[in-house]
Amino acid sequence: MRLKSSINLFIFFLLNNFLFAQNISGIIKDTENNLLFGVTIYNSSNTKNEISDANGNFSIESNHSENKLTISHVGYISKKINIESSGKPIDIGYITLENNSLDEIVISGTLKEVSKLKSVVPIELYSSDFFKSTPKTSFFEAIEAVNGVRSQLNCSVCNTGDIHINGQDGANTMVLIDGLPLVSGLSSVYGLSGIPQSLIKQIEIIKGPASTLYGSEAIGGVINLITKSPENTDNFSIDTFTSFWGELNIDLGSRYNFKKSQGIVGVNYFNYSNPIDNNGDGFTDIALQHRISIFNKINSKNNSLAFRYFYEDRWGGQMNWDSSFRGGNQIYGESIYTSRFEVFGKYNLSKKIFLQYSLNSHDQNSVYGITSYKALQTIGFIQAVYTQKIQNHNLLFGATYRHTIYDDNTPATEEREKTLLPGLFIQDQLTLSKLETLLFGIRYDNNSIYGDIWTPRINYKLSSKDESSIIRLGFGTGYRVVNVFTEDHAALTGARDVIFLEDILPEKSWNLNFNWNKKIYTKHGTIFDMDFSVFNTVFSNKIIPDYDTNPNQIIYGNLDGKGVTQGATINLNSLFANGLKIIMGATFIDSKVTNNNTNEYPYLTEKFSANYKISYSLFKPKIAFDLSGTIIGPMKLPLLGDLDTRDPYSPLINIINLQTSYTFKEIEIYGGIKNILDFKPPSDSIARAFDPFDTNVEFGTNGQIIATPNNPNALSFDPSYVYYSNQGITGFIGIRYNF
């Protein structure tokens, strides 16, 4: 009986394969009838995949009664097709793939939605998936994966920092959320951590002045975080991971319906409460943090309204510090309480007119040893934009008003400051031909403290007929109104006194930029996307902190000369038909300032940097491997005088990360190792860590530190000698769930 059953079973399978064995063939094209090569066709019924040839043709085998084809290609929306088998070859004819324009739409360059290829202003676009290869605990840490963009720590103790673009100071970078200037002033240093990454759709980056559209603080570049729309968000999502250091990060997101509106809510929770001192200096290697951020966004027919609340308790210091020592002189600690609330939105009055508005309040309560810093900043912003097309002119008119109220307990702020900043701007995008576009723009601001400020710009784009090669030229100006204490954490930490030589004037810049984008498609389905830029920025009235004149002081004043930042950056993205992705980028920077006819090199500005990421995915089972890295060249560091034996330049920084992930259904499990080479700054980065209150430091009548047998190098306690995180090698494991 067993033999007979086996024979019957064999005959069944033989007949089944005979009846249903077939070839499925077709031709892949896009919406403009261009044949597509390198398209992946996957048959989930029998786990086979094929690649379309140079003429868009494909043929895939099948031996099942029902076939489920998944057709996917880089830059296009994937398509799924169900086919019932008949045992005969099936030609399904032409299959059209639509361009994935949702991932290619940018708005930051011109305030209008336009495809990345059509944008006159060069914009770098990064989806949220780009940052998943090595999970970070905050947006501030994650952004360093972008070539030419660097997360710069400003304090070895509390680990606050800012974001540098192409070697420029972090205060020159404007961070936007949905096109609104929410991250500025106080939050440019302290508010970069609490942005729920699960709700970020994409990040747009403009390298170079953008003050014509965005005003002050956009002097060096713009980073615009675009949040997801409720209608395009999963019903529920969770992304949580923990590191071997004891860090715990949780991102939650959920979609909901409210009457005729749709909304999303996101929560970010982060906790690190495990003091570690691997270098033996008696101080925490990385700051301990406890924060929560709540984000809510609701969309209706013509209106979008969002709010965010952020609270963080952060401290770093001597290992035996706790909150009972806060502000005292027994145990040194830097403790920062941050409370922040934001409301922002957009209202479409018509197809041509829209309003943008925001209100944010930032409350800071900090102590740095015995130095107290309490500050409250409230910013109200409203902007009206009108668009009009007249023949080959795309016109844009805007009117803005920004009201800033700022108060702190520092000597620089004797009474509460109110700054009124009304502004007007106009922009004309002129289509010269199908291949050429010219853009003019000018902005006028009236600062209630500094008066009238004009910021013009001009941009030109020339593309090939197939848009595989694009050249962009740009000239623009920028400006920045400065508050030292809101932007420079080093002015408060440590034992240095802060000295102002004069009333600080606004910085101004002039930038010239050349950009070339080239795409190459091979007959084997490989895509090469190369982006090359050359930039030159000249500053006047540049504010340079002087650490050298007096080691016990930080002296601020406007530059008596000019500052120049020039260089080149190149990005190369390679996408192979077999699923391999290689992303590489390098930036070369020459930055110097001329002060009193003397050339000087700024602190914490690298000569070169590089980023890379190698990704490979297996379709089934879906396993992904990601190797990523960051290289940062030497940077000039602030020393405490001629007797300071620490290296005046940082070493080459080489950070390598590895991650593996496995996905089944809606669940993704991932894990890996960060900082494989275990790079850490030297153990003496904090000068005189054993004497944080300068108990045994002697000063002369001129304020200079005197060398003594107990202090032969004439040092004082100083944590400003910092250039990278002190967290060494660590493993991590996490899980993502979406449905």
Image (cartoon, rainbow, N blue to C red):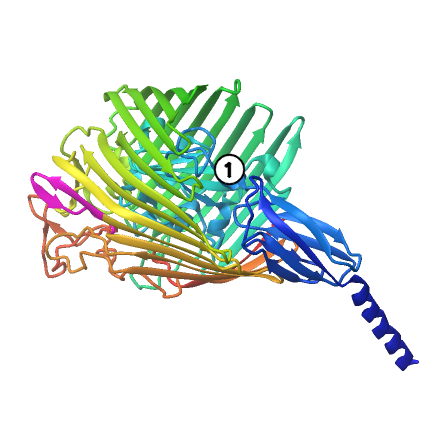
* Image quadrant where residue 536 sits: top left
**Direction right: furthest residue:** 1
The residue depicted at 31 percent of the width and 22 percent of the height is 443
| Vertical placement of residue 499 versus 369, above or below | above
* Image quadrant where residue 624 sits: bottom right
Q: Left or right? Give the position of 435 relative to 513.
A: right
Q: Position of residue 329 (x, y in %)?
A: 27, 48
* Image quadrant where residue 561 sits: top left
The residue depicted at 25 percent of the width and 22 percent of the height is 453
Please check the rendered image and state whether residue 601 is part of the magenta-colored stretch, yes or no: yes
Q: Position of residue 722 (x, y in %)?
A: 27, 52
| Residue type at the position of mark 1 | Thr
Quarter of the image that includes the N terminus: bottom right
Q: Position of residue 12 (x, y in %)?
A: 85, 70
| Vertical placement of residue 268 versus 643, above or below | above
User: Observer-nearest residue: 391 or 168?
Assistant: 391
Q: Left or right? Give the position of 273 relative to 212.
A: right
Q: Left or right? Give the position of 464 relative to 92.
A: left
Please check the rendered image and state whether residue 12 is part of the magenta-colored stretch, yes or no: no
The residue depicted at 55 percent of the width and 34 percent of the height is 296
Q: Left or right? Give the position of 354 relative to 94.
A: left
Question: Which segment did they paint magenta?
Answer: 590-606
| Vertical placement of residue 657 versus 541, above or below | below
Whether residue 656 is visible: yes
Residue designated by label 1: 227
